[in-house]
Structure formats: structure tokens, C-alpha cells
Image (cartoon, coloured by chain):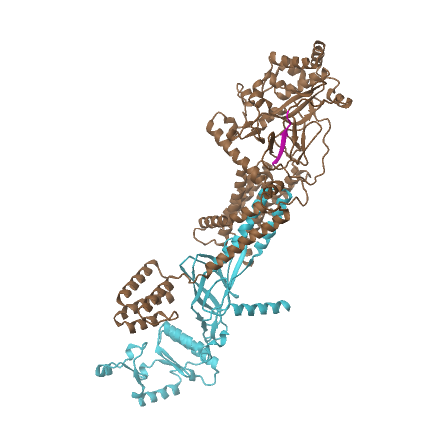
Amino acid sequence: MIIGRFRQRWRRWIDRRIPRSDDQQFTQKNIFILPSGAGVVFGILLVVMLLTGINYQNSLIYLLTFILGALFVAAMHQTHSNLSGLHLALVEAGEGFPGEPIAFRLRATAKQAAFAIRLAPEQHDAHTIHVDAGAISEVELATTGLRRGPVQMADIRVDTRFPFGLLTAWSWMRPQGQGVVYPKPVMPPYEPGGDAGGETSRRDNQTTDMVDANIRPWRQGDLSQRVLWKRYARTGEMVIAEWEGEHRDPQWLDYDQFPGADRELRLSYLAALVESRSHDRQPFGLVLPGQTIEPDSGPLHRQRCLRTLGRFGFDTAPEGASAA
Amino acid sequence: MNETATTTLPARALIWLLGAFVVLLAPQWDRLPIWLTAACLVLAGWRWLAQQGRVALPGKLWGTVVMLGLIGVYVATVQGRFTVETAASFFVLAVGLKWLETRTARDYYVLFFILCYLAAVNFLFQQGILWTLLNLAGILILLVGLQVLNAPEAPNAPVAGWKRLGGLLLKTLPVVVILFIFFPRMSPLWSVPLVSNQARTGISDTMEPGSISDLAQSSERAFRVTFADGLPPHRERYWRGLILDHFVDGRWEPWQVQPRRRAGRVLSDGGVGPLQSGQYDVLMEPTYQRWAFALDDSRAVSTNIEPTADGLFRFRRPADTSIRYRLALDPEDGGELIQALSRRDEQRYLHLPAAGNPRARELAAQLRADYADDSALIQAILQRFRNQAYFYTLRPPEMPDDSVDSLLFAAKRGFCAHYASATAFLLRSAGIPARIVVGYQGGSPGADGDYLIVRQYDAHAWVEAWTPSRGWFRVDPTAAISPQRIESGLREAVAEEGSFLENEWTSPQRYGDIALVQWVSLRLDLLNYEWQRWVVGYQGQTQMNLMSRLPGNLSLKDLGYLTAGLVGTIVLAAALWSLWRQRRPGVYRPEARLMAQWLRQLRRHGVEADRSSTPMALAQAAAARHPDGARQHLAFARALNNHYYGPAPLTRADRRRLRNLLRQLRRRT
């Protein structure tokens, strides 16, 4: 009980002392250092050796004890400076499906060489890196998100026992940058699009009625075959027809296609469809309430769509809310 | 600890551990039984082969069998004697057995601790400078191994490890020196004498006719002496050690075995300060015995020895480490009152077995009849040795029965112990009180002739006789037979025979005629002598004496405070220094540097930008201000961006390219 409360308080103190940030510079302010288990035993050993030296009046045992003791203190400096001067930056926040490892890419640089730095996210495998002075070392750490939405890296414990393993210097890196957990793909019971007659006919009408109204200027990312080249030849203006007729119409994946399903399920359906379309290399577009992603294909497009699905409903929340 | 407990020990770290073990085992080689050393090496080798996958480590059953087997052998050889030596042997055995269950990184630490302590134990037995260096080397190997263990993938770990360790040692050197000088040397909290049961080269407390010639085959050092007034001549260097006055079964023994003293507080005052005129310092190698060696007519100056009734000196506890004491020569006055022997003493010094050696007894009676005066009789005996064909030899024939008779009348070849024994026998038979003195005679000068080295082959036995007019005085039959032995030493005395150190191939003394060998050996000895005097012998009174030269009268307690203060100050200074070093701004990152340069350059040219701007924003601001350089600015920003956020790290070539670009920009803007 008391330990739990103490731990909580310690946790809060750490959170205040090491604010969330994508950039972490380890300095005197945020490095902690204590003897490791081996270091404690070593301390006891030194006392025993000193007693032996006293009892046998043996100067050389005194000398050996002093040398080892001084090295112990020097190792404290060394271990500390091994970590201090290290700089960690979150380069890329990861994304992935629920339950999959979501890799966060960190970049480490160091003023002076840092050896055997262990990066251990809570409940995940630790990585050990060496960073040479002035060099860059990258590491990918995994976290798992179970629920759809933005995900933050858990606190990463950064520690080192170098050189002798008798002391542990440690600190935390608490990245602010958020990755995304995509919706869990769930195949919808029926394939919308071709079968869903009502939907397409509605669009058909729209297309035939409002051809002009749906012409818009070319934007980066538009497929070249969708440019109205005739019009370009005439006016020199690159425009795109939003709906170009049924036979070349890419498959639109629409949030509103699944009446009766709740939001998460709809997003899951959409995710599954994005996956299957991407797998078949078919172009597709995505329509969500309030935002539209133009039809396209390829891995970047897939990622963009999945990311949008993952973020859906979260982006309106104030940025700093989760980073208190 | 969780992680290190489960990770297996990498082979690279294991090599260092094994190496350190072998190095730290070496200082005990002459003390450990052969089987134990062999077992340790086999066990370590086994572990190494297991690491390479050639053999398997024993399972629980076999491990237990091996362990019980070796412990059984140990118990059988120790036979219930418990001394520090046997404890040290058991310690070594435990280390050896640990190899069979060294699997994880945590086991490395266990062995690291044990081996550190083994080094400390080694210092109990060996304190020479070379052994000290070897022990320290073992510790350093362990520490390099620890670095390899903690960063096994680091490139070129061993070399970097040595460098780092060297740097750490250099940095800590001042603290170590200060601690060594100032740390208060307390007296022992409890006393456990280091009693040895192993035979050590040196004089023993019985003398059979052949015993000293064994010593003559050893060039081990017995002790070293520094004189205040220069070395005395060779023939006067008679170092008395102990007196044997009981002749029984052809063997000389002390009349009374000294009572074993309870181990108690030991005064470690070995005499401090410069030598006064007439004084000399003896630094004795451990003998595990209580006797000290001194010249005739000496008196004790240091308090760690005490005189006995016979003009000898004794330590308060067996000399289990090298020990230093100081004596002074009394000026020869001769005006001393000679005390008559008590009746009991007279009986004791005249006592002979009832039977044996009939011809010697006959000769003694004959001499007594010829010479009424004791001194004349003694002269006659020496004359006999001088005139007749007696030989001084290291290869005497066997003389099993009636040793005195066979020496005097048959063999006529013998060593100092034979002649001393025969002379004492003759004197006692003739009614002159006599006793055997065992010790050393001679010694050779060390480097620069500053001190005297007395070696085991200088061991000697002679006779002291008592007459009412002169009291006790020395009678040395060896001087009559082989004057060279007394004038210049054993080497010359047996030069013709060629038997000097004939079994000691490695001893530098054997090659005394090669100047270089001799020079190196003497220099090494000098180094060791200074080491023993100033480092090994830096204890108790020596420290207090050094401290008394400092202002203020420092007690042990003051020393404690002083040590804590000095060390604390150094540690604090080091901490402040590293703090200051870290306060210096700026992370070293080449991109950031380039960016900062660019920013400075732009500011000089009136582009308003701050540190938080991204490269692209800066480029746009610069382009707005200096349109003709816009393309370069953008290119620079893009390149910088690539390295900041892209996957490609900045190589040396990239950096050069960017710097060139920056130079072009300076011209443009």
C-alpha cells in the first residue's frame, strides 16, 4: 500500500522532471545513478578486503582496496558521462494494426561515444546501442496498441552499466509524437460498390447532372489519366473531372455504405476493404464524414487511408490533451 | 540484474576471466599442492572447451561427483589442520570448482569478486614488487573483461577497454596515493596468525649433520641489512639466530622447546627515522618462526623484537610477512663483568649422551691431558683441523653412525654443521661448556654496496665456548678448515668443487661470473628492497613518523578526518569539473553546426530568422531577401533536411559538400 503510493508519487515526480518531448538530451538534471546489485556486493567486498588488510597489517591489501575503491568512484563518473551527452530524438512515430508491434524510430547522437546504452520501453524488448562520437545511430522500438487511435510510445527507460556493470545510470525518454493504430480490419458481410445498386445510381445521377460543377484544378497526387486533356489543349488549364463516368470510376469506399453498423465497425470494414483493394492493386478512394481522399493506388495511398481511418474522430481533440 | 542473470557468458568475456584466473593463480604456485594447481587448470580448460562446444559441462550428478571428489582429496591432504594457508588453498579449490557452473553473466561477477579477493589473499604470501605487479595485472585483466562483458558488440572492445582503464587509473592515481599515505593504519581488530605448516626454506630449530648443506643449495633471500656506518668486513658478519645446546641421537636441539605464545597485539614499530651511528636495519623475509637474526653484541632499538638471555632476539609472533627491525652494535668495551655459569647451566652445556663416539672422547681426554688451559686446548683443536687433511665440501659422504667419529677420523670431509657438531662434542668431552649457534655468515653487497643481502646459502653453524676468563666466545672450526668461507663466502669456498648452487639452474646467483646477469639481479633486488621498505613496510609507526613531520600533532583519528577531507575534496572537485563541462552549450551534431553557421551567416546579411526556424523557412526568408541566391538556399535547405529527417546519416563527404555550398552562399548573399 505504502510502497504503491510511494511509487505513484515517484512516478509523478519523474513525470514532472522529465516532460514528454520528442527530443531528449540527457544531462545532470535527468540522469539517476545507483550501484547495481553487483555494485553493492562489490562494496561489501571492499569492506571485507579492508578488514583483511587491517588484520594482517598488509599494506598491499590496503593498496589493492584503495585502487579498486577509487576505480569504483571513477566508474561512477564514467557511467554517468556515458549516458550524459547522449541525445535521443524521435524521428518517426510508427503505425500498424492493433496487436501488431508498432515501431517508433529513434535517432541517437552523442557528444562523446556512448557504449552499451539499453533502451527499454515498458513491457517490451530492450535494445542495446552503441553511439560513436558525432555519429548517428538509429533504433526502432516497438510498442503495441490495442485500440484504434493515436498511440504514444510508453516511457522508455534508457540505462547503461558501462563500463564495469557495477553502477546503473538511467533516465527516461518520454516521446510526445504519436503513432497511429489502424482500425482492426473486419471484412464486411457484403461487398459494397458494384452490388450496392442504390449507391452507384445516386452517384451516376450526380455525375451526369453536374459534370461542370465537379471539375476542379489539378492537384498533386492526381492520376494523369484523369486529367481532362482536351480541355488542357483548349485552355492550357489542367483540370480533373471529379466523376468521370461509370466504367472508369474507381471504387469508392464510403463511410455511409454500412447503415446500421456503429462507427468502429464501419471503420473496421473500411480498413478491411482498403487492405483487399491494395492487395489487388485496384485504385480506390475514401469518403469519410468531413473528409475525402481522392482515388489512387500504391502503398503510400494505402498508408494514408489507413492512417486517416485510425485518426478518425481523434483529430478534433486538442493536441495537448493527452500530453499533460 | 534480471537481464544479466539469464544471458549466457560470451566467449570473449570468458577468455579474460580465464586469463585473470591463471595470472592470479601464479603467485601461489609454490604454496599450493601440485594436484590442486593441476585440478584448477583442468577445470578451467574444461570450461573453455565447453564454450567452444567440444565437450559438455557436467550435469548435476557429474558436477557433484567432481566436487565431492576434489573436496575429498583436499580433506585428505589437509588432515584437519586449519591455518590461513589451508584456508587459502580451499579458496583456490572453490574458485576452480566454480568453473563448472559458470554459465551466465552473473557468474562472471561471482568469479570477479572471488578473484579480487584471491588477489588480496595472494598478498599475504607474496609481497615482492613483481608479484604485486602480476596481481595487479590479474585485476586489470578482470576489469577489461568486465568491459567486454558489458559491451560485447562494441568494436575493438579489448583495446578500447585497456585505454579506458588506463585513463581511469591515471585519474584515480592521486586519490589512491593520498589514501595510501593518509589512511590511518589501525592495529588489528583480532589476531589470526598466519601459521604455516609447510616447510619453508630456512633454518630449522634442529640440526642434523647434513641439514645446513641443503640450505646451501638455495639462493633464496633470508634478509637484507642496511648499516649506518658501512658494511662490516666479511669475516665479522656472524648473524646469530638460535642456539642448539642439547645433543641427542646425533642431532642438536634446543634444550627447551620455546613455549608457544598466545597470539596477541603485535607492535609493528620496526624502527623509524634515519639510522643513528652504530645502528642497522634488518628486513627479514617471512620465516613463520619467531627468531630474529643479529650480529654479536647487539641491542634492540625497535620494540618489535625482544632480547633473550642468550643474547638472541625474538619476535612476538611468527614472522609471517616480511618484517623490519632495528638493532644497534654496542661498542666493544670488554669491561663487562663475566658472570659465572650457574651449576645448572654448566651441566646443560657439558651434557653428552652416555655412549657413542668413543674415539672422539678418547681424543678429548688426550687433549685435556696435554693442555690444562682451556684456550690452548681450543687452539689445539683448531690447529688439528688446519693441519690435517680436512676438507670443506658440499658433497660429504654419508655418516650414519657415530657421526663425530667418522668425520674426525674416517671421512675428514664435511660441511660447517659437521665440523661444528664435532667441535662442540670435543669441547664438551674435554669439560669446556660449549654450544652450537645457527645462523648466517657473510652476505653479499646489494646494488651500489648500500646494503647487504644474506641468502640461504650463507647459512652457517659454529660453536661458542665458555671459559671463566673470557665468558662465551666464538669458535668457528670452518674458519680453520676453509678460511675462504669466512673471508669471502661459500662461492669461493667450493669454487674448485663446482658444487655451488648446482641444482638451481634459474638462480641468477649461480651465474655470478656473468656481469650483466649480476647487475640486473642486483638492480632488481634494490628495487624490491626499496619497495619492501617504503610500500610494503608502510605501517603503523612508519606512518606516524611520516605524519609527525607534518605541522600539527596528528593522531590516528586526525588522520582519519584528514583522509576523508582530502578524498572528499577531490571527489567534489571532480564532480564540479564534470558539471562545468556539461554546462557548456551545444550538442555535437554536424547538421546542427552547419545550421548554426548558416543562421549566423544569414543574420549578418539582414535575414531575420531565429533558432527555431526550420531549414525550409530559413531558405524562404533568405530567398525573399536575396532572390539571386534563392536556388542555392533552397538546395542547401533540402540537403540539410534530408539529413535531419531522412534515413541517410551525414557522411564526411556530405559534410564537405554542404560546407562548400555554404561558402558559395556567402559569396552570393
Q: Which chain is cyan?
A: A
Measured along the vertical axis of the image, is residue B629 above or below residue B432? below
Q: Which chain is brown?
A: B
Residue at the outermost right position: B343
B259, A257: nearer the viewer: B259
Question: Image point 78% across, 22% down: which residue?
Answer: B343
Q: Quadrant of residue A112?
A: bottom left
Q: Position of residue A273 (x, y in %)?
A: 41, 77
The answer, for residue B621, to whether it is visible in the render is yes
Q: Specify whether B584 is left or right of B490.
A: left
Q: Specify whether B534 is left or right of B371.
A: left
Q: Quadrant of residue B190?
A: top right
Quarter placement of the N terminus of chain B: bottom right
Total residue callouts: 0
Q: Position of residue B551 (x, y in %)?
A: 58, 46
B432, B327: nearer the viewer: B327
Quarter placement of the C terminus of chain B: bottom left
Q: Position of residue B107 (x, y in %)?
A: 56, 51
Residue interval drawn in magenta: B322-331
Question: Image point 43% across, 81% down: which residue?
Answer: A190
Measured along the vertical axis of the image, is residue A199 above or below residue B450? below
Residue at the outermost front position: B551
Residue at the outermost bottom position: A209
Q: Specify whether B18 is left or right of A208.
A: right
The answer, for residue B388, to whether it is visible in the render is no
Residue at the outermost top position: B370
Question: Image point 48% across, 54% down: which residue?
Answer: B151
Was residue A1 drawn as part of the magenta stretch in this picture? no
Measured along the vertical axis of the image, is residue A251 above or below residue A106? below
Label the magenta part by its dominant secondary structure: strand
Q: Position of residue A106 (x, y in %)?
A: 44, 65
A12, B446: nearer the viewer: B446
